[in-house]
Image: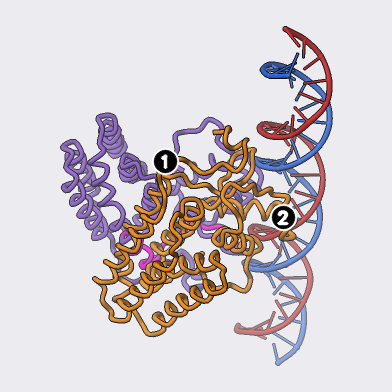
Chain colours: A purple, B orange, C red, D blue
Amino acid sequence: MARAAQKTESGDERIVDRMATAIHEHRLAPGMKLSEDEVGEVYGVSRTVVRAALQKLAHMHLVDLRRNRGAFVAQPTVKEAREVFEARALLEPRTARSAAERMTPAALARLQSHIDDEHRALDEGDTGRALHLSGLFHVEIARIADQKTVEEFIAQLVSRSSLIIALYWQRRAALCESHAHHALLQAFAAGDGTLAEDLMKSHLLDLLTSLDLRERGSVPQSLREALSE
Amino acid sequence: MARAAQKTESGDERIVDRMATAIHEHRLAPGMKLSEDEVGEVYGVSRTVVRAALQKLAHMHLVDLRRNRGAFVAQPTVKEAREVFEARALLEPRTARSAAERMTPAALARLQSHIDDEHRALDEGDTGRALHLSGLFHVEIARIADQKTVEEFIAQLVSRSSLIIALYWQRRAALCESHAHHALLQAFAAGDGTLAEDLMKSHLLDLLTSLDLRERGSVPQSLREALSE
DNA sequence: GTGAGCATGATTGTATACGATTCTCGCTTC
DNA sequence: GAAGCGAGAATCGTATACAATCATGCTCAC
């Protein structure tokens, strides 16, 4: 997970990466059915490896595996959405502080390039990809903090945030995000851990308030789903 | 994960539970090879379901999956051990506070019964089982806090702590743990969130200092392993 | 016309089979 | 005698086949 591109990427890992990216970029919508045969045909592999990939995605809470029913792109509930951001609030601010204290010029450059990529994607109108890159910014911070364990948690939470945003986003201004990231970058450049921690805290709060988390569940895509739970 | 015993537990889940328990209770030692054929024979299932189970255990960092080499009970490094306890320090104190604020008589009783079970196991000399139950105490707190997302993370970290303790434990006095848990219980009973948070913080610190985390790797179990890395 | 019951098709769960990679161990060679 | 090498065995990775479960649409009774 989040490891540098390993040349011999075991079959299913390739599929996990591509499907995860598709979900992050909102090309696979929440609730969509992921038939094993269909996925296998797309990637030219058998159901065996598809099942392994789907299981890994299920562990990340990106897909929902229902016994004897199949795999579906996850549909986080309002409660789950809140919990994800509460968990992020516990983990990320302190991690940002650690990152600031361990910052190096090379790491700073990587963060800057993430922001640049994000802006470029935004200019090209590819908001899905911009969102994905925006998430990677957060994961990169955890990596710089040299906390692999926390990094994995954050990576998972960022992933799930993608789905949450797809379902509950209400505000148009995606620009504020870039501003927040830019401010963080400056704190990192200054090596100001306290500032970085505070900025991250308010950035997450800002993200949370930009969601419409009034109890209503998601807009059911079919009558069946509206009644099934 | 951590769900109430579902009657129709999909084949591999049964194996995951039993193997995880075996690892938690230190019946499966770190570094031990887990041959797919062998495991399948033990549980009377085919390699297909064994592979699924091993994959899930790998996601929890309880087993280490090496491509074309097989599955092994994980051997956390010193660095990993530190990271796990740092992550716990980020998550658990605040979660304990939440739990204290949401405490109910029924939840309090469940915690008490956990402690009782732990003492009983200790009296019977089953330190492995006592350790396992001691971990479940922490997970139960997260459940009471009604934070499923954080609960899953804590469950994983507690699991990994089991392996870490198996490798790096140096202090005999397992009793201090029970004392800490008892003190926590009283804070919960009083509904004192601040106290619970502080107690949890120092409890985790105490756990950490009871480990011998000087750089030395693990004691290799075979000459081969001593030389392989 | 409506609703229950059943048969059929589709999809997942599990087992088995085969090819690929790694490990073992005896043999050759220096 | 020790190091390098290669054939055989063991183990893993993937594909395929079959069994179990669920969804769909029909028939038929009311």
**SS assignment at label 2:** helix
Question: Which picture quadrant has residue B228?
Answer: top right
* Quadrant (top left, top right, bottom left, bottom right) of the C terminus of chain B: top right
Image height of A56 relative to A114, above or below:
below
Q: Is residue A142 visible?
A: yes
Disc 1 marks which residue?
B215
Q: Chain of mark 1?
A: B
Q: In the image, what residue type sits under mark 2?
A: Gly
Between residue B70 and residue A61, name the one nearer to us. B70
Sequence-earlier tag: 1 or 2: 2
Left or right position of B73 against D19: left
Left or right position of D1 against B148: right
**Do the residues under discs 1 and 2 have CB atoms within 8 angstroms?**
no
Between residue B20 and residue A74, name the one nearer to us. B20
Between residue B56 and residue A20, name the one nearer to us. B56
Which segment did they paint magenta? A68-85
**SS assignment at label 1:** loop
- Residue at x 38% of width, y 49% of height: B83
Disc 2 marks which residue?
B40
Between residue A121 and residue C20, name the one nearer to us. C20
Provide residue A13's location: percent of width, then percent of height.
54, 41
The verdict on residue B179 being magenta is: no
Provide residue B117's location: percent of width, then percent of height.
51, 76
Of circles 1 and 2, the one toward us is: 1
Q: In the image, what residue type sits under mark 1?
A: Glu
Label 1 Cα crowd, 10 Å radius (few <14 / some 14-19 / many 20+):
few
Image height of A131 relative to B173, above or below:
above
Left or right position of A86 against A29: left
Q: Chain of mark 2?
A: B
Label 2 Cα crowd, 10 Å radius (few <14 / some 14-19 / many 20+):
some
Q: Spatial distance from mark 1 to mark 2, Cα to Cα? A: 36 Å
Q: Is residue A26 visible?
A: no
